[in-house]
């Protein structure tokens, strides 16, 4: 199937070209460039995903109205401060899009969202209940250093109150950004952490400093600032919806590839 998609792309683009900043580029040259950069497979994957989405939406009589497309286009223009028509046309030209092609891209995105909801909206609550632990979060600070002895010494100094965690992060962390932020790592879900780190973090208490953990060739000392209980927020709701849909979509594409 992947070979068929590639052949279809090549046959449909034999006489097509793209005007890039006044320089014509043949479509076959674009396909060749994708091949040589080992990126053509990913593009073919997207083509198949679009085919599957279109077919599934048609089977369920899901449509996107012109009014929905216009409303989304207006929202995007406002978000990107493209208030004037000329600004919008310049932006589209910079992305090698015509107004009609932009509408198609908006329609595809809205159709995909509508299909997600039609297929899996009723399963989000159940998935959240079954995987609630994955949506717990922790506010974390981290010091990353290259040597175990240094990590252990920093940990002892913090424990003995010879230096604060934040001072140690500012002086020793390998990551310049984290040094400037005194080790602030962020608000992270359990599943975003390395498994070894997740076990230690979610077994600790707020305010605890965790003894050094080796992650690949580096050594980390962590401080747990606060825990945030799992809640089905709009963001988590969309994360689950997207996950369920992407798993289904990958299964449908794999079926096409191997039938």
Image: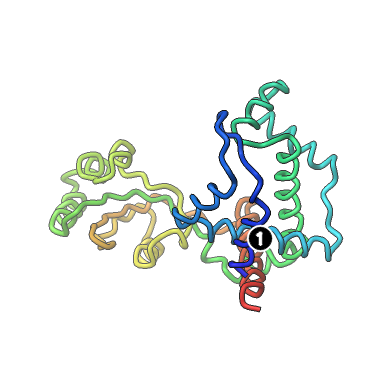
Residue closer to the observer: 189 or 18: 18
Residue 226: where, in percent of width, then height?
A: 43, 51
Q: List the single residue furthest toward the front.
A: 15
Question: Would residue 249 be found to the left or right of residue 65 on screen?
Answer: left
Residue closer to the observer: 114 or 215: 114
Q: Quick check: 166 above or below 22? A: below
Q: List the single residue furthest toward the bottom.
A: 259
Residue 219: where, in percent of width, then height?
A: 23, 57
Counting the numbered discs, the total is 1
For label 1, the residue is: 8
Q: Quick check: 258 above or below 201? A: below
Residue 74: where, in percent of width, then height?
A: 75, 32
Question: Would residue 34 be found to the left or right of residue 194 on screen?
Answer: right
Mark 1 surroundings: few (<14), some (14-19) or many (≥20) residues within 10 A: few
The answer to whether one can see residue 241 in this image is no
Q: Residue at 51% x, 60% y: name it.
A: 136
Q: Residue at 65% x, 50% y: name it.
A: 13
Residue 24 found in image quarter: top right
* SS under mark 1: helix
Residue closer to the observer: 37 or 27: 27
Question: Would residue 46 be found to the left or right of residue 38 on screen?
Answer: right
The answer to whether one can see residue 8 in this image is yes
Q: Residue at 52% x, 64% y: name it.
A: 134
Q: Quick check: 247 above or below 208? A: below
């Amino acid at each position: 199937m992947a070979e068929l998609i590639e052949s279809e792309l090549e046959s449909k683009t034999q006489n097509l070209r793209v005007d890039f900043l006044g320089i014509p580029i043949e479509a076959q040259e674009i396909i060749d460039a994708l091949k040589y950069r080992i990126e053509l497979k990913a593009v073919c994957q997207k083509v198949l995903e679009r085919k599957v989405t279109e077919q599934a939406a048609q089977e369920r009589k899901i449509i996107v109205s012109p009014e929905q497309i216009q409303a989304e286009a207006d929202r995007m223009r406002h978000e990107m401060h493209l208030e004037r028509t000329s600004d919008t046309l310049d932006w589209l030209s910079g992305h090698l899009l015509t107004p009609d092609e932009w509408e198609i891209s908006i329609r595809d995105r809205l159709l995909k969202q509508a299909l997600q909801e039609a297929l899996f909206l009723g399963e989000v609550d159940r998935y959240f209940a079954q995987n609630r632990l994955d949506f717990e979060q922790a506010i974390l600070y981290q010091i990353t250093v290259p040597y175990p002895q240094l990590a252990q010494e920093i940990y002892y100094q913090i424990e003995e109150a010879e230096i604060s965690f934040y001072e140690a992060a500012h002086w020793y962390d390998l990551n310049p950004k984290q040094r400037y932020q005194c080790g602030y790592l962020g608000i992270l879900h359990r599943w975003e952490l390395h498994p070894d780190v997740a076990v230690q973090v979610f077994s600790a208490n707020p305010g605890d400093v965790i003894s050094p953990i080796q992650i690949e060739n580096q050594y980390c000392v962590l401080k747990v600032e606060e825990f945030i209980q799992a809640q089905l927020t709009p963001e988590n709701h969309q994360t689950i919806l997207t996950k369920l849909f992407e798993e289904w979509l990958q299964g449908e594409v794999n079926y096409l590839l191997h039938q």
